[in-house]
Image (cartoon, rainbow, N blue to C red):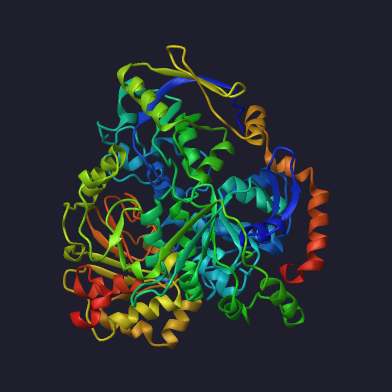
Amino acid sequence: MAKTLFDKVWDQHVVRQNDDGSTLLYIDRHLVHEVTSPQAFEGLRLAGRRPWRTAATVATPDHNVPTIHREQGITDPVSRVQVEALDANCREFGIMEFGLGDIRQGVVHVVGPEQGLTLPGMTVVCGDSHTSTHGAFGAIAMGIGTSEVEHVLATQCLIQKKPKTMRIRIEGRFPNGVTGKDIALYIIGKIGTAGGTGHAIEFAGSAVRGLSMEGRMSLCNMAIEAGARCGMVAVDDTTIDYVRNRPFGPDAACWAQAEQAWRTLHSDADAVFDTEVQFDAADIAPQVSWGTSPEMVLPVTAEIPAPEEARNAVQAEGWRRALEYMGLKPHTKITDIQVDKVFIGSCTNGRIEDFRAAAAIVRGHKVADNIKLAMAVPGSGLVKQQAEQEGLDRIFIEAGFEWRDPGCSMCLAMNADRLEPGERCASTSNRNFEGRQGMGGRTHLVSPAMAAAAAIAGHFVDVRDWQEVQ
Amino acid sequence: MEVFTQLEGIVVPLNRANVDTDAIIPKQFLKSIRRTGYGPYLFDEWRYEDRGEPGMDCTNRPQRKDFVLNQPRYAGASILLAGENFGCGSSREHAPWALLDYGFRCIIAPSFADIFYNNCFKNGILPVVLDEAVVQRLMAECEAQEGYRLIVDLPQQTITTPSGEHFSFAVDDFRKHCLLHGLDDIGLTLQHADEIRAYEQRRKQEAPWLF
């Protein structure tokens, strides 16, 4: 029977089919960070349990680490306790950790693929919703809660109900200036933040095949913002080339066998999906979110909508609240919105290609006078090193950006990197919820190039016009 | 995990769609390494006028009077009525921990985000999906009638209103079983340890690069 990509990977990981319809699913890779793991390790200790297979688990602190003055250690005592708890738990249970002093430390969803810890056809979990990122490798990658973190540590399995499948096909060629991030935002704008609920999404079509691994990761990263259990892209040459020679990838002895298996990781031609959606790449423009949910998003050429244009009363009320929170008036042109801060980084857009795209815009310019802070925060120590070897750090610093150490930073603002009430931010992160980047802070989600252009212009601009703007 | 069988309790209507886990428990409280103590900070930014910090004593913080949880008529509530896609966003289990710590054992909404929905069952909270029209009607009844209570019956899978009206809801057999008996599902999975080992042996042959 014809199978979807999701079915193929799922079927390879079924340990046991339970009578009640649930499945005991084997987990190949478990990524751990400091925020959602301490209670899981404590649970193991209280029950007198040991991890089932420590080699499957890798940890790194990211959510709660400082991105500046690392030499001073973590000055916030509450954050320090949490990061030290991760160090201690990894030592006690024998789990490999890329700690704060390790160049491999960084945002867990940047580190996994970079190290070859994420491989095609794997099941990958992490106590973080953006685990969907790893689906870019044709893996089933799911965010889980802390109870399930403990469950995976103790059993290397999860009890799962098989989700439905959805294929989102994007055909054609993207206009210049349109990135994986814009595609993700565009899709969420169309299907809504609950559009993928209960589904595993496969992103397919010629436009998706044309994306780099970085672009595919940005796209799958935001599958969770569409409510999906996971997002996936089929394996092809782009995938295999990215994985080749990664430190934790297959050794030479089994590379050929691995590659042969990975080459089968695509949906069969006549596979049937529960839901199918199709978009035309040519319709997608650079996107800017205007509200407090990722589905409140528009092309940069648009105007802020009015609640009267909403499709029903619930949505109209949501828009009214969002407009008030965001301090925006209907019919304002998006390009007339001034920003106070700019954040380039996160698990969505903290990879080398993202910093190259942003630096290409910033090169030779200065950050606008109204920008209080522009930050470039690499997704890992190795991304930072690579960027510095390419001289990207100089471009950002000379333009007036701060060039920081790796971490989640202002994506969720657990550390000192945050917005003050009323401040408006052009951000390459993934969530524009109320208070996400700091209480009262106003987030606009954009691609790295769009964030960089906003930093230079002081307001949103269409990067497709960037040459003319200069 | 505390057993869930039947619950009769005061209901709070939170008539908003897409309530995300950042709103349920803001990020600064995720620095705690414990499972308890989050209740005072539930919906912190909607509940208080000042910025909350971990460990803060909340008894004298300025409250936002317009937020439902601050209205005296809803004191002691154990059932939350909410809009569609409740619990979207982050996977933080601190969200159900905060709801539980505050006293909620049941959340009724037209739909839930997947990870949040799953996290509730792991903590003895029953998430109930009812039709949007029904939820809106319950919201209206709840707002109109002070002291409005619902009866939630998990074995029967029904919600009963003060006027005696019943609504049935669906729940997975496995999740229901665990909730009814307060079961630790790690213990259940470890009953299949031999099957997990057999799977690993087989996979090592098929895909040695994974081990």
Q: Quadrant of the C terminus of chain B?
A: bottom right
* Residue A269 image position (x, y, % from top left): 62, 65
Whether residue B161 is situated above or below residue A65 in the rendered picture: above
Residue drawn at 71 percent across, 57 percent down: A1
Residue drawn at 70 percent across, 37 percent down: A20
* Residue B53 image position (x, y, % from top left): 36, 46
Residue A71 sits in which quadrant? bottom left
Q: Is residue A74 visible?
A: yes
Total residue callouts? 0
Whether residue A277 is situated above or below residue A383 in the rendered picture: above
Q: Quadrant of the N terminus of chain B?
A: top right
Q: Is residue A66 visible?
A: no
Residue A360 sits in which quadrant? bottom left
Residue drawn at 42 percent across, 29 percent down: B80
- Find the residue positioned furthest to the top: B163
* Residue A240 image position (x, y, % from top left): 61, 78
- The reply, left or right, for residue A204 in relation to residue A457 is right
* Residue B46 image position (x, y, % from top left): 31, 39
